[in-house]
Image (cartoon, rainbow, N blue to C red):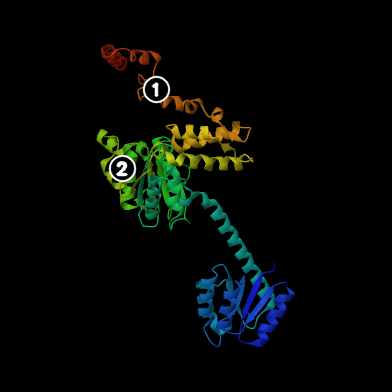
Amino acid sequence: MPPRVLIVDDERLIRWSLEQTLEKAGYDVETAESGAAAVAAANQEAPDLVLLDLKLPDSDGIDILRQVRALHPTTQIVIMTAYADVATAVKAMRLGAYDYLPKPIDFDAMMVTLRNALEARQLRQKVEFLQEKHLQPFRFDRIVGASSTIHHVIALARKVSLTGATTILLQGESGTGKDLLAKAIHYESARAGEPFVDITCTAMPETLLESELFGHERGAFTDAKMQKKGLLEVAHGGTLFLDEIGDMTPVLQAKVLRVLEERRFRRVGGTRDIAVDIRVVAATNRDLRGAVEQGTFRKDLYYRLQVVTITIPPLRERREDIPLLAHHFLEHFGREFKKSPPRLAPAAEALLVRYHWPGNVRELRNVVERATILEDSGEITPAELPPEIASAGAASSTTPAGIRLPFASPRPAWYWRMSSGSSSVRRSRRHTATRHRRRVCSA
């Protein structure tokens, strides 16, 4: 489909000559002799590019520029102006025009400018498409769950992401999805176009972690042969995700506290402060309050992190989400393995719901992946589930201590035989049975 160009000029001869030239070059051309006609044409169908004269009989070209850009932000606009109005053309470029052409028009230069403008538009559309495709998995609406608890978590996180909150603490067991929620907070915020930098505080030794976070100057230590920017600098304007901050050493805790308080830091071996504009999202699966009481986590850092705290519930506390998550992962792995997503047999689904999921959503994801690989009948049955899940049905009928309750239904035959004698015998046997139950329970 040829690019659509809208020519806006009050001089009929200029419109005609531009129209003839562009149509011969293969463009789909429409013309307008006034600002009102230009806005009406843009309203009817979005042009790919507008050739806009700054001097129009009914309006200023700058106003038309603003209106067209408001209607169609991706439309490229090239200004046509006399040499005396170059300053106005520069102003138009600051408002979003791609370039300007001085009058009288040099047609060869115009064709180059139009081609470059349309290529820039196509490139920007491709970048926006790829960005949207990349960011799509990290939206709040991609977090699967129908329970009231997860809805509350998402609502709170969405509210926080739209504010200027620069410190957020995510709490929850391992595998609950703290990293996914951190990315959603970033990519649904005004910082989405800036870097999201994550680092796991338990993944490296203290000295290396410090160098990664703060960077270092050349010669700061033996292997520092050149200056290196730290992740704090890389994340400038965006979000720094500190995963498992509860395992950070006390020395680094003090330095991170200073960053949170002052938004400044020094590289290792540096002598000057570097200011950064970052949002810090910290996550932990530890009880930080208990760590403070034990002296392994700084109290001042704990209270500084608690500006906004979001606690993600474990999967066993939102069992109504388990079937939804299981079917979501079945669809995902069906696409990944290039096969039709298998069905989940009711018996297998019941076992998934009954299981206690110590590894939370991460464990469920792994279980569904394994089952999708193993099944070959189009249906996942209990046979494709790990033994600990397949045995969950038997375990659910026992007490937490693992002891089966006595006289559980169906009751043994001797119980009914005891009940068939005289009233005095029945009383005696009930007394004997009661003592027997006490012995079994005490055992």
Q: Secondary structure at mark 2?
A: helix
Task: Residue 442 in the image: state x and y as whole percent.
Answer: 29, 16
Residue 205 falls in image quadrant = top left
**Cα distance in 3D space between marks 1 and 2:** 60 Å
Task: Residue 104 in the image: state x and y as whole percent.
Answer: 64, 83
Above or below, comparing residue 179 to residue 381 in the picture: below
Above or below, comparing residue 88 to residue 304 in the picture: below
Residue where numbered disc 1 is placed: 409
The amino acid type found where label 1 is placed reads Ser
Closer to the eye: label 1 or 2: 1
Mark 2 or mark 1, which is nearer the start of the sequence?
Answer: 2
Task: Residue 428 in the image: state x and y as whole percent.
Answer: 26, 12
Q: Is residue 426 left or right of residue 21?
A: left
Q: Secondary structure at mark 1?
A: loop
Does residue 39 appear anywhere in the picture? yes
Q: Which image quarter is the C terminus in?
A: top left
Which sits in the foreground, 433 or 324? 433
Instruction: Answer few, some or many: residues within 10 Å of disc 1's Cα (few below 14, many 20 plus, some between 14 and 19).
Output: few
Labels 1 and 2 touching (C-beta < 8 A): no
Residue in the picture at 51% in, 76% down: 67
Task: Residue 98 in the image: state x and y as whole percent.
Answer: 57, 71
Residue where numbered disc 2 is placed: 254
The amino acid type found where label 2 is placed reads Ala
Q: Is residue 55 left or right of residue 166?
A: right
